[in-house]
């Protein structure tokens, strides 16, 4: 299984766009000194608990599609992941 790390740092997701194969797991780790919550823009997965600095949230994208998510505490923070049947290289 593919595992990809996303940093939450300086009120942004890095990288902020990913292209992944189906069944890839994305782990978002809060590197800010303020809390964040990772939430699906279209309710395709359950949001994370409040992530304090150093805490992480993981989600496996089981089916192909495009998934947009954001921080529900700071809604201007957005991320997009695309999942396909192929195994492309993660992009930024």
Image (cartoon, grey):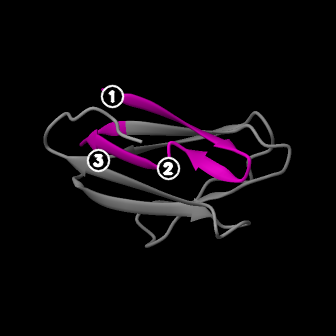
Instruction: Tell me, for residue 62, which label it has, or none.
Output: 3
Q: Is residue 68 visible?
A: yes
View extreme (right): residue: 33
Give the image location of residue 21, x and y in percent.
24, 39
Instruction: Tell me, for residue 16, which label it has, or none.
Output: 2
View extreme (front): residue: 92
Rendered image quadrant of residue 37 = bottom right
Rendered image quadrant of residue 25 = top left
Give the image location of residue 22, x and y in percent.
24, 43
Q: Residues within 10 Å of mark 1 (few under 14, many from 20)?
A: few
Rendered image quadrant of residue 75 = bottom right
How far apart, in angstroms, are the residues tagged by discs 2 and 1?
Answer: 18 Å
Q: Nearer the viewer, residue 88 or 71?
A: 88
Range of the magenta residues? 1-24
Marks 1 and 3 close (CB-CB < 8 Å)? no
Q: Nearer the viewer, residue 44 or 84?
A: 84
Q: Is residue 39 visible?
A: no
How far apart, in angstroms, are the residues tagged by discs 1 and 3?
Answer: 11 Å
Precedes in sequence: disc 2 or disc 1: 1
Could you tell me which quadrant the N terminus lies in? top left
């Amino acid at each position: 299984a593919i595992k990809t790390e996303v940093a939450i740092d300086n009120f942004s997701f890095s990288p902020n766009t990913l292209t992944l194969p189906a069944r890839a797991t994305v782990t978002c780790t809060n590197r800010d000194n303020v809390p964040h919550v990772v939430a699906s823009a279209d309710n395709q997965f359950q949001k994370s608990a409040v992530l304090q600095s150093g805490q992480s949230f993981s989600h496996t994208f089981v089916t192909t599609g495009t998934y947009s998510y954001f921080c529900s505490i700071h809604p201007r923070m957005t991320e997009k992941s695309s999942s396909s049947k192929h195994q492309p290289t993660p992009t930024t």
